[in-house]
Amino acid sequence: MLFHLVLSVMGDPFLKQLEILNETNQQPKPRHISSDSGDLVLDYIVSLVSKIVYPEETKNQPERLVHDVLLPVEELVDQDSIVAKKSKAIHELEHMNDPRAYSLLGDIFLFSKYQIQRNISRAFENYKRLSDLGDPVGLRMVGLMYATGLGVERDYPRALVYLNFAAEHNDAQALQTLGYWHHAGIGVPKKCDTSYFYYDQVADKSAQEWRTGPLGGKKTPRKRVILPDKKGGIYGKGASGGGNPTKQSQMSDVDLFLLYRLQAESGDASAQYLVGQFYYQGTQTTPPDFEKAHSFFLQASKQYPSPATLSQPDVPGHIKQQALAASQSAGYLGEMYARGEGVQQNLEVARKWFERGVAQDNGASYNGLGMMYLEGLGGLEVDTKLGLKYLNEAAQKGDVKGTFNLAEQLMQYEKKDWTRIVSLLQIAVKGGHPMAFYHLGKIYGSGRQGVQKNCKHAVSYLKSFVEKASWHDTSIPNALDAFLVGDYESSLVHYIFSAEKGYESSQVNAAWLLDSGVQQDPLPYSLLDQWDPYQMALPLWIRAANQGHADARVKVGDYFYYGLGTKKLPNKYHPIETQERPVLDKIGHWIQELFSGQEMVSPDYETAALHYQQAADQEQSSIAMYNLGFMHEHGLGVKQDFYLAKRMYDMALATNPGSYLVIGISLVKMNIKWTIESLFGTRKQEQQFEAPLPLDEDVDDQVVSIFKEMVFITILCVVAGYLLYQRQRLLNRP
């Protein structure tokens, strides 16, 4: 047997039992393994599976992956092929009857771990076996698979049952999911009190975890990445939003970093401080590098000008900037020594840096030294009065941590000034301090003297805190890691699961991956073999839009405009057509089906217009304004009105001046059409299937719309050319 290599360290009784089974030629029954021996077996199996790698030239060949039917071979030999070795390892895991083995198998088949072929149905089977044992992870995973339709038919009532059982076991991710569902009305009626009940439990766990960190609390996970933003946004660079993209900085974060790095190496103190910040905080895709941050902060801190220089009546601006960078670097160095980041933790050294920063009038140093006096750290005696004085100084200088710490100290007084506390916490929230969200959620959840209870505010603050302090959930970093290595389907699974927990970024990322097509040539058991990606993406766009994402709201309008993903929506979203559709509409509809490969439903221009209007009014989306102008021009879903169309075009141009060329062409075309209809008294009585801005870079589904526009413009150009030709002839006559 495979385990003979490790059973010798597990004890004689277990080894003898297997020997008896082998001697009697009986097939061993599923093995219940003790915790200690189970750890050894699992470690051995995992190491075996993870160490078997494909040669570089065969990594991407599906036929070399583990087949659906596992090989029923009991002994591993060196001559076994890669497939055979992995098959035997999985075979052993499936017969262990151990919860950890079921969990590992579920992850292997769902996320295609160790280069083993994805098999969503088998993943569900293993998570189901795990859930049958009452394991909260299994209960949660089965619930999420029912909620998303992964491996099974989507069924929110069943998902709710499994997630409730997981929540009963205090599973933080299940609690968070239920909190969001009751907040947004997903699968259950909206109920603020119930949402608060679930979020409150997760928030308490996260707050407790935050307090386990060093001075200043445990660092929150990196800021979440919105994938389309890395490619200029959902609609491309400069296509949406306000402002003039032609006047915005064209430099990326990497370009800025390289520029500052060159300036820092030439001795610029401000650049050294900025580069230190880059390394200390990290980027969305790069983890922090505390050692490099320490090096640059140290260089900047040494460049504080002399008192004689700063005491001059007219200090040059660059000297002031140098002094500011040096003092801020001192505050960072004090924090790094206090927390043990990039250096060995040393509270005495941290105190010296904070004292130096206080002498240089740095807000972060006031906060650090104040907390040391309050807690008696770094060789200081406890001095509450002096500590509060320093925190007040930090708050007055706009230091976010100092503002929060002052509010938290005031909350410990017997007679509390809740008005001032709430004011300080709201300032800290604006600065992004995670625990400020937590305290405001608690305050609004129960109400305080002078602060009225407000469930909506409470849930909003606790939801934000839980999503910032998401140590309990690794799905988002796992999704990003999978995306960066090109495993887009695993990334999609992680983002879909975290989308159910209420993360707006995950809802956008999952919808964008589905909308873009995560894999052109799906493997067997691929995700895209089971879904219409548009039907999966539309609810995600809607949820992101309901959380305030402007481009997601425009995307929802696009889906209704084109009839994408709306096939299984309630009938209220599908208008009943009372008149025969124009022939060109039917041809366009047929061509869309041909190019998209999806069965199209009738466009719902009315609903599309409502979403565009909401995006234009509430999010100031220039794309939505343009689309509304187009729809008013052509009478699609709204009454044809050239005045309103021009107004929307003008608003789009004012919101986003960079779109002057597109809007200018549209205005010229509309004015020509307007003039012709005014001269000849014609009015378009029928709707025509025309398209607003492109749905994405793929324009195959807009062939007919573009063709009609080209024909119309070509006719106008021919007529205009003919008239000019005749005019020239008349002018050239003798």
Image: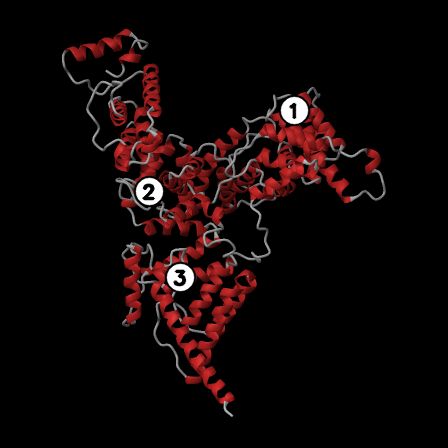
Three-letter amino acid code at disc 1? Glu
Tag nearer the camera, 3 or 1? 3
Dividing the picture into quadrants, the one containing residue 438 is: top right
Of the two numbered discs 3 and 2 in the rendering, the one whose residue sits closer to the viewer: 3
The answer to whether residue 438 of the structure is visible from this angle is yes
- Per the image, the residue denoted by label 3 is 608
What residue would you read off at disc 2? 147
The amino acid at mark 3 is: Ala
Give neighbour class at mark 2: few <14, some 14-19, many 20+ (Cα, 10 Å): many
| Rendered view: 59 above or below 18 | below
Residue extending farthest to the front is 734
- Answer with left or right where residue 71 lies relative to residue 612: left
**3 or 94, nearer to the observer:** 3
**How many numbered marks appear?**
3
Q: Amino acid at mark 2?
A: Ala
Q: Which residue is mark 1?
A: 375
Circle 3 packing at 10 Å, graded few (<14), some (14-19), many (20+), is many
Q: Is residue 107 visible?
A: no
242 relative to 172 in the view: left or right: right
Closest to the camera, between mark 2 and mark 1, is: 2
Mark-to-mark CA distance, 3 and 1: 58 Å
